Image (cartoon, rainbow, N blue to C red):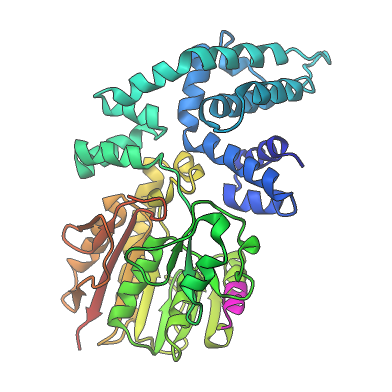
């Protein structure tokens, strides 16, 4: 499957509700590496500023957008993204490929009439759009900048309310930054030796995490040397930092991972502490199956057990000495890495998630025995999902005390009043929030 064809297929899956990362793995898992890389590039540059591409389509298309065939509409959006964003790829090649694809699209009379439309729109965009986009980005209006950087206007307004105009504009800029993969080296893996063996990916050592290896690319995980053997694990540096904070206060025992997901953080915990035991919960059977595969890959599955169900109602099999609550969230801190998420989020969905987070944190506090610790974390930069969610529960409790964040991370900010917020200031970092508490004896 060629790269452009593969990208279109993945984007069709995303339109039907799939997550881009999962659709790429499912659709392109056996595709030749160079074509898979091209397809992934097209998918992510299309999704990253999808709102802008659709705005440009309306601006430069002479036909009402509402009248355009759905398949043609996808070709136009991909084409606009590609001719403006693709590096080392001649625009004319992309335009020709999309025009040829459009010739297969027939109207109700069996005629093909959209190839000319695509050719005309894309050539107009090539000629006129770059200056207009720069005007949007240079505007003093937060709304214009949100459009220019490809962020929903309601998100920009919310960031402005929570962070102030200066920081909101900074977040808009950071949301378009190219992200790269970082790898967590497992204990026993010589980071320097691994990097010397993978020079083609230009690896480098993190400047604040001893186990992190930075790549300047985003390879397919099974292609990474040592991945299948559990020597390295793809994980953002913000996520590694959060677990390091937990481990700086907890020296082992039994940990409850209330929202286990794919088990990445549990894997870090179990490989870091030899006598740790993890009980993991998640509402999704497929995520739990993925976590079991992850822990087996790392060779630590014998010290973990999982249960499927709602964390608000499940009961731990034994009292934990620590709880990790990696709460479900909007994932707004990872929108640079997973841009499809920002087009699914709404103000209403963020409010609903925040209410669930409050209930989950209260439940964690109730479960935890005296003397135990909790780490609440999210990959969000919305205060309502972070400090506000924790603060509403803490206001009603006298038995919890916050612990300091010991692990260092660049560009961090103190939460108001609880926790630490890490900003997505490098290609290997996501926006992240973590707060650690101890239950009084």
Give the image quarter of residue 231: bottom right
Point out residue 299 in the picture as x, y percentages from the top left corner. Answer: 58, 82
Q: Is residue 286 visible?
A: yes
Q: Viewed as shown, does residue 130 lie left or right of 441? A: right
Q: Is residue 298 magenta?
A: yes
| Viewer-nearest residue: 157 or 213 | 213
Instruction: Determine the image quadrant of residue 297.
Output: bottom right
In this picture, residue 340 sits left or right of residue 117: left
Magenta residues?
Answer: 292-299
At a point 53% along the width and 87% down the height, the residue shown is: 303
Residue at figure coordinates x 59%, y 55% from the top left: 219
**Considering only vertical position in the picture, is 195 above or below 176?**
below
**Residue at left offset 30%, top offset 73%:** 245
> Which x, y percent locates residue 264?
49, 69
Quadrant where the C terminus sits is bottom left
Q: Residue furthest top?
A: 62
* Image coords of residue 240 (percent x, y): 39, 67
């Amino acid at each position: 499957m060629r790269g452009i064809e593969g990208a279109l297929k993945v984007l069709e899956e995303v339109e039907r509700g799939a997550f881009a990362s999962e659709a790429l793995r499912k659709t392109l898992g056996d595709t030749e590496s160079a074509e898979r890389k091209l397809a992934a590039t097209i998918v992510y540059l299309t999704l990253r500023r999808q709102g802008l591409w659709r705005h440009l389509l309306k601006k430069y298309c002479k036909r009402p957008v509402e009248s355009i065939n759905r398949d043609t509409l996808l070709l136009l959006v991909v084409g606009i993204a590609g001719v403006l964003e693709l590096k080392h790829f001649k625009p004319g090649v992309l335009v020709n490929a999309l025009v040829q694809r459009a010739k297969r699209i027939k109207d109700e009379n069996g005629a093909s009439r959209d190839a000319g439309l695509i050719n005309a729109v894309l050539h107009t965009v090539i000629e006129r759009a770059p200056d207009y986009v720069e005007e949007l980005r240079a505007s003093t209006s937060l709304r214009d900048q949100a459009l220019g950087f490809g962020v929903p206007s309601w998100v920009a307004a919310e960031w402005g309310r929570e962070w102030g105009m200066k920081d909101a504009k900074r977040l808009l800029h950071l949301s378009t930054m190219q992200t790269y993969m970082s790898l967590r080296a497992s204990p026993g893996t010589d980071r320097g030796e691994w990097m010397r063996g993978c020079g083609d990916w230009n690896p480098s050592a993190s400047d604040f995490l001893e186990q992190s290896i930075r790549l300047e690319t985003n390879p397919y995980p099974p292609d990474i040397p040592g991945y299948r053997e559990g020597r390295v694990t793809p994980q953002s540096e913000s996520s590694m930092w959060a677990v390091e904070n937990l481990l700086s206060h907890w020296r082992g025992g039994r940990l409850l991972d209330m929202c286990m997901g794919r088990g990445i953080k549990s894997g870090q915990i179990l490989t870091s502490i030899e006598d740790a035991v993890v009980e993991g919960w998640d509402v999704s059977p497929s995520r739990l199956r993925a976590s079991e595969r992850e822990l087996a890959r790392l060779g630590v599955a014998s010290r973990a057990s999982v249960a499927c169900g709602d964390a608000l109602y499940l009961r731990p099999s034994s009292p934990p000495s620590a709880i990790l609550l990696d709460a479900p969230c909007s994932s707004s801190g990872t929108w640079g890495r997973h841009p499809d998420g920002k087009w699914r989020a709404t103000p209403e969905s963020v409010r609903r998630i925040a209410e669930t987070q409050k209930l989950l944190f209260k439940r964690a506090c109730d479960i935890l025995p005296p003397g135990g610790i909790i780490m609440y974390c999210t990959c969000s930069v919305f205060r309502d999902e972070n400090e506000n969610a924790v603060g509403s529960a803490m206001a009603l409790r006298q038995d919890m005390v916050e612990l300091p964040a010991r692990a260092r991370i660049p560009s961090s900010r103190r939460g108001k009043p609880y926790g630490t917020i890490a900003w997505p200031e490098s290609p290997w970092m996501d926006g992240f929030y973590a707060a650690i508490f101890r239950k009084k004896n």
